[in-house]
Structures are given as C-alpha cells and as structure tokens.
Image (cartoon, helix red, strand yellow):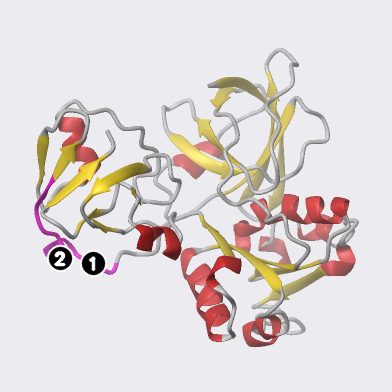
Amino acid sequence: MIPVVVKNIVEEAHNVVRLVLGSRDGSELPAFEAGAHIDLHLPSGLIRQYSLCRLQVEPQYYEVAVLKDPQSRGGSEEVHRLTIGNELAVSAPRNHFSLVDSPRHSVLIAGGIGVTPLLPMAQQLQKQGRSFEFHYCAKTPEKAAFSASLKTASFADKMAFHFSQQADSGRMDMVSVLSRHASDSELYVCGPADFINDVLSQARMQGWAEERLHREFFAAPDPSEDESDNAAFQVKIQSTGELIDVSEHQTMYEALDNHGVFLAVSCESGVCGTCQTGVVSGTPDHRDVFLTEAERQQGKWVMPCCSRSKTKILELDL
C-alpha cells in the first residue's frame, strides 16, 4: 500500500467530489496510463476501486472523482465525509481498460460518472494526435462531472454532450453514433451497468466486432438469478488436492475462506478483478462483469467472489 494525504477536495457536480491525493513525503507516485484505477483504503477499513480521472501533471499526485451513490454500500458516503489532510492508503494503479495501440478511430461513450476513466483516455488520444470522438451522456449539466471543463478542453471540438432532461439536447441517438464507425473504430464505454449493456447490445446489432468493444463496469447489474438457481458443487485445490464443498447458499470465496484458503477479494460482485483465479478443470458459471465474452468462452479464469460452477467439481489454480 502507498500512503497518501487528501490535498484538495473539489465539488465537480451535484453529489460528485474530486479528490486530489498526494504522497505524504512529496515523492513520486507510480506512473499510470489512461483507463487505470486504484484501490482506495478508507479509514473505516473499506476498500473501493476508483478510476484515475486525469493524467498526471505532477507525478506526486493522483486524482479520483466519486459519486455519492444512494445505493452505496458505504464507500462513496465515506469518501464524501473525507476532509483535507486525511491520511489514506492506495494501491499501485492497475489497468484492465487501457487504450488499444491502434490507428483506428476511437469512440468514447460515457454515462454519468463513467466519464472518469474516459477523460484521461481523451487526454492521451489528443496528446498522441489520434482520431477520436467523445460522447458524454447525463441527465443535466449540473449532474455531469467535469462538463464545464470539458467544454473548454483541448479536445472540446471532439466532445458531444447528451443531456436527457434538457430540451435542447436529449438522449444520445445510439444507432446514429454507432452506425457511423462500425467497421473501422474502437469503442470504449463506461457508466451504469444497464447503460453499458445497452450500448454494447446496439453496437453488436450495428456489426461491431467483439474484439473492438471495450468496457468497464463500476457495479454489477442487478442479478437475474435468485438463490434457487444455485446448485452445490465442490472446489478442488490443485496444489493440495483438497475438495471443498460450496453450498447453494455460499460463494466460492466464502467456502475457501472458511477452510483457511486465502483469496484477495475487494468488490465481492465480480466487477474489479481482484479475486481472478485460474481454472485448471471444470466449467465456470460466470456471473461477473469483469471478463470479456471471449475470456468467458475460454474458461481459463473465474471470479470466486460471485461466480459458481456448471460442473460438480471446479479445480482452481490455488
């Protein structure tokens, strides 16, 4: 963990604050590329993942922007109670949502607070002189973090704002936006789960290739399964051969933890990728939103915090 101090707090929109986090001793923080996120270790012990929302201008600072979510499990509310001078800890940046090194045009689509990882992507694309367009969807300008600064950014000519509750704006026409570049672009989308799924579904209908669809979820969609869909199974530990029962009321992580098998877990909903574990044999029942469709089909990885097994035994690389 890296010790940091809250250097500044800025209200970026209604219920959205931007934290400027600086190293405690003024030393440089680990560098990162657009799309990266950090684990923020809060005073209560909660750990939450937040996208780094701006490229570093000074190497001793990170910036994150956090929406106070009414459905919060406590993390965003605690962030909004922080004050300047509070001491925290963060992880080194990790990136599962990086820009593809490609000459293709990039289409960035943000829904609400999903703007945070896309903003540094726009900065990086602009810096590299690459072709892109940036669509920002929100209810109103007052609820759209960074909307004022984006209108005057160096890439302002590439911005398109879609405010669903503003008469002279309205919702984004997904068909129009996605049909223009279906064969020659990379798509990057972030926002609420339903928003992401709608964009990806429409992109597939417009003929976008799966490998050019890039997304990052902040939260999992509401689960479609209830507990009656769960079946008991066993997890096999490859290194020891031990078989551990997983009941229909347990997650793999809970069963492993009860038997003293350590597994790093953070979000517990299949969003962040912290618990990603290799699969040796068996067929996972994927219930995460972290893995891509191609990765799910390969069956080489599973998220034990939420996913289950379609076979009676799932052998893990533990």
Q: Amino acid at mark 2?
A: Asp
Q: Amino acid at mark 1?
A: Glu
Seen from this angle, which residue lies furthest top? Answer: 25
Bounds of the magenta segment: 224-234
Marks 1 and 2 sit apart, C-alpha to C-alpha, by 6 Å
Judged left or right of residue 89, residue 18 is right
Tag 2 residue: 229
Residue density around tag 1, few if under 14, some if 14–19, many if 20 or more, within 10 Å: few
- Please tell me which residue lies in front, 302 or 254: 302
Question: Who's the residue at 78% across and 72% down the image?
Answer: 160
Judged left or right of residue 113, residue 48 is left
Question: Who's the residue at 70% across and 42% down the image?
Answer: 33
Quadrant where the image shows the C terminus: top left
Question: Who's the residue at 56% across and 66% down the image?
Answer: 211
Percent x, y for residue 234?
11, 46
Secondary structure type for disc 2: helix
Mark on residue 225? 1
Judged left or right of residue 78, residue 258 is left
Secondary structure type for disc 1: loop
Residue density around tag 2, few if under 14, some if 14–19, many if 20 or more, within 10 Å: few
Mark on residue 156? none
* Depicted 74 relative to depicted 217: above or below: above
* Residue 229 falls inside the magenta stretch: yes
Percent x, y for residue 204?
53, 80
Q: Quadrant of residue 101?
A: bottom right
**Are dots 1 and 2 in contact, CB under 8 Å?**
yes
Percent x, y for residue 307?
27, 53
- Please tell me which residue lies in front, 261 or 8: 261
